Image: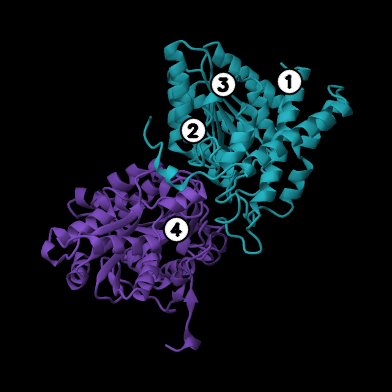
Chain colours: A purple, B cyan
Amino acid sequence: MTKSNERKLTIARAMAEATAQEMRIDPSVFVMGEDIAALGGVYGNTRGLLDEFGPERIRDTPISETAFIGAAVGAAQDGMRPLVELMFVDFFGVCFDAIYNLMAKNIYFSGGNLKVPMVLMTSTGGGYSDGGQHSQCLYGTFAHLPGMKVVAPSNAYDAKGLMTAAMRDDGPVVYMYHKGLQGMGWLGTEAGATVHVPEESYTVEIGKAKVVREGREVSIVSVGMGVHNALKAAKKLEEKGVSAEVVDLVSLVPLDRETIRASVAKTGRLIVVDEDYHSYGLSGEVIASVTEHDISVLKAAPKRVAFPDVPIPYARVMEQFCLPNPDKIVAAWEEMGTLQPV
Amino acid sequence: MAPTRDEQHWMYRNMVTSRRFEETIAKIYFEGKTPAFNMANGPIPGEMHLSDGQEPVAVGVCAHLTPEDVVTATHRPHHQAIAKGVDLDKMAAEIFGKATGLSGGRGGHMHLFDADVNFACSGIIAQGMGPAVGAALSRKMQGKPGVAVAFVGEGAVNQGGWHEAMNLAAVWNLPFVCVIEDNAWGISVAKSAATAVPTNDVRAAAYGIPGERVEGNDPFAIYEAAGRAIARARAGEGPSLIEVETYRLAGHFMGDAEGYRPEGEKDGLFEKDPIPAMRARLLKDGAASEEQLATIETEAEARVEEAIKFARESVDPAPEDALTRVFAA
C-alpha cells in the first residue's frame, strides 16, 4: 500500500461504514438506541445513517434500555438483526436482565432452535474525568457471563471488520468500543487507533488475537486502549534493551488462549494490562490461561497492570493515579526482573 | 398559597446565585480547552451539564424544604443543590476536583453528596427515584419527620425504575414527591419522540395519586404546586407527582453543538429567561425595591466569587487517596 491510497478512518467512522455497508445488503439490519439518529451517536458511530436509511431503520429510543434491548432480543429471534447501543457501558445496571438473562441465554434455553443475531455496542473507558458512572470498562462483567461473544477493537481496521463480523453472527455480540480511541475531537484520541481502513466490506475473525509487535523477552497482553499503552511501553523497554511482544486480544469471548500461550511460551514472561478492575477479571483470566496450561514456560511470576479495586474517582490526579499507563507497565517489568524464576 | 415576601426574596436570591455560579463555571470550564476542545483538559474536566433556565423548579420546590428533608438530584444538579442549601464552597471545590470538595474529589459534578442537608445525586437517569422513596420509607418507619423529593428530567419517566419507584411510594403511602423538570429534550431526542403522552401529570392516575402540570416555568406557580404536594406528604397523605415546564438554556453538556434544535428555538427561550422575568415581577408587585434586588444580586455574586476562590485555592487530593473511603470506616 502506498501512502497515496491510504485511507485513514477513526473508529467511529469505521463502525458507521461497516453498519451502512451491511444495511445496504441486508434489510433485516436496523439500529436503535439513544441519540443514534439525528445526533449520529454521542460517540459518532452512527453518523450519516439516518440520512441514508431513514427513521424506520435508524431509531432513536426513549431512555428505556430495558425495553429496547429486550425488544432487540425479541426482534432478533423473529428474523431481524438489530444493532443496539447502550450509550455508556456503565448504564448496564438498568437493563442487565435483558442482556444476561435474555440476550445471552435464549439460544441455550431453546436448545439451539433459536438464533439471536444482535449486536450490543457500548462505549467504555475513562481518563477524561467523567466520574464513576461514566468511565468504566466492565470487560470482566460482560465476558464472565456465558452466551455472549465480546469484542473490543483497538483500531479502526479491526473496528470495521469486527462490526461486520458481529452483524453477521447468528448470536449476540457485545461490541465494546473505547471512548479514548473513538476519534471524537472533544474527547481527545489516541492517534494509533486511526489507521488505514479498506473501503470494501470485510470481516475480522471474532475470537482471534493478534500479535501486534513481535518480541522475545516479555509478552504484554491487553485489549482496547491497553494495547496502545502496551505498545508505548514496548518502545520504552526497547530503549532499555528489552524486547517486548504485544498481543492485542481483539476479542474477550471467545478468548484466544492459544495465541496467549504461544507468545508466553516464547518469551517466558507475562504482563497483562487491563483498564477494568484488577480482581476477578480479564487480567486474572489471561494469567490463568497460561498457568493452568503449562506453568513451566514462565521464567517469572506474571504481573498485571489494572485499575485498582475502587470506584473510578473524578479528580484528575486520582483517576490518573489509578489508570494503567506505559510507565506502570515498564515498572511491572522491572519488578518482574527482581523476582526469582518460578 | 403564594410565597411570602421573604420567600420571594429567598427564591430570587437562589435563582441568581445558581445562574451566576453556572456562568462562572461555564467560563472556567473553557480554560485549557481552547483552541482544541478536549473535555479532559482544564481546571474543570469531564462532562458539564448546566441548569441555566431551570432555576425556578429548584427554588419553587426547595422553598418548602428544610435541611432534614431529603432531595435526590440528577446529572444536572447545581440549581437543586444550591436551593437545597448544599455548602457552596465544598460544592465548587468538588467540581474542581479538590481535596476540600464535598467528597474530596471522588464524585465530581454529577455526584454531589451533602449529608448535612440530605442531598444526593445520581448520574444515571431516574436512579434518584429509588433512594428518595427509600428515605421516605425510612422516615415513616422511624416515625421521624421529613419528606423526600426526587427531581428527574422528563426523559427519566420512561425508565422502568421510575415507574417501579412511583408505584412503591404510592402503594406504601410514603411522604414522597416526584418533580419532573420537563426541559423538552433528552440530549437530542425531543419529548414528543420519546414519550407517548404529551404531559406526564396524567401518569399519576396509574398510581392513584395526585398529578399536576405547571406551565410556563413560573416560580410562583411551581411554589404553589409543590406546596400542595409537600403539605400532603407531611400530613401522611402519600406521594404526589408534579411536572414542570422548564427551559434548558444551555446544551445537554458543554460542547454540545445542539444541531438537533429547531432553528430559532433558543432565541425564543432566552426571551423567556426566568430570572429577568422574576425580577420584573417582584418590582411590578412591589415585593422588592430596585435597591433590594441590587443588593441580592451583589451578594449572590460575591458568594459565588468566594466559593470559586475557595475552590481554586484549595489543593488537589493526594493521588493515592483514590484508594481510600471505598468501604465504611
Q: Where does label 2 land, which residue?
A: B128
Q: Secondary structure at mark 3?
A: loop
Q: Residues within 10 Å of mark 4 (few under 14, many from 20)?
A: many
Residue at the image point whose x is 51% and y is 26% from the top: B115
Mark 1: few/some/many CA within 10 Å (<14, 14-19, 20+):
some
Relative image position of residue B57 (x, y in whole percent): 66, 31
**Labels 1 and 4 positioned on one and the same chain:** no
Question: What separation in Å lies between label 2 and label 4 (alpha carbons)?
Answer: 29 Å
Q: Residues within 10 Å of mark 2 (few under 14, many from 20)?
A: many
Q: Report if residue B214 is visible in the image.
A: no
- Amino acid beneath label 3: Pro
Along the line of sight, the residue nearer the viewer: B211 or A193: A193
Label 3 or label 1, whichever comes before in sequence order: 1
Q: Find disc 4 in the rendering and name its residue.
A: A31
Q: Look at the numbered disc 2 and give the secondary structure of its residue.
A: loop
The answer for how far apart the CA atoms under marks 1 and 4 are is: 50 Å
Q: Of circles 3 and 2, which is in front?
A: 2
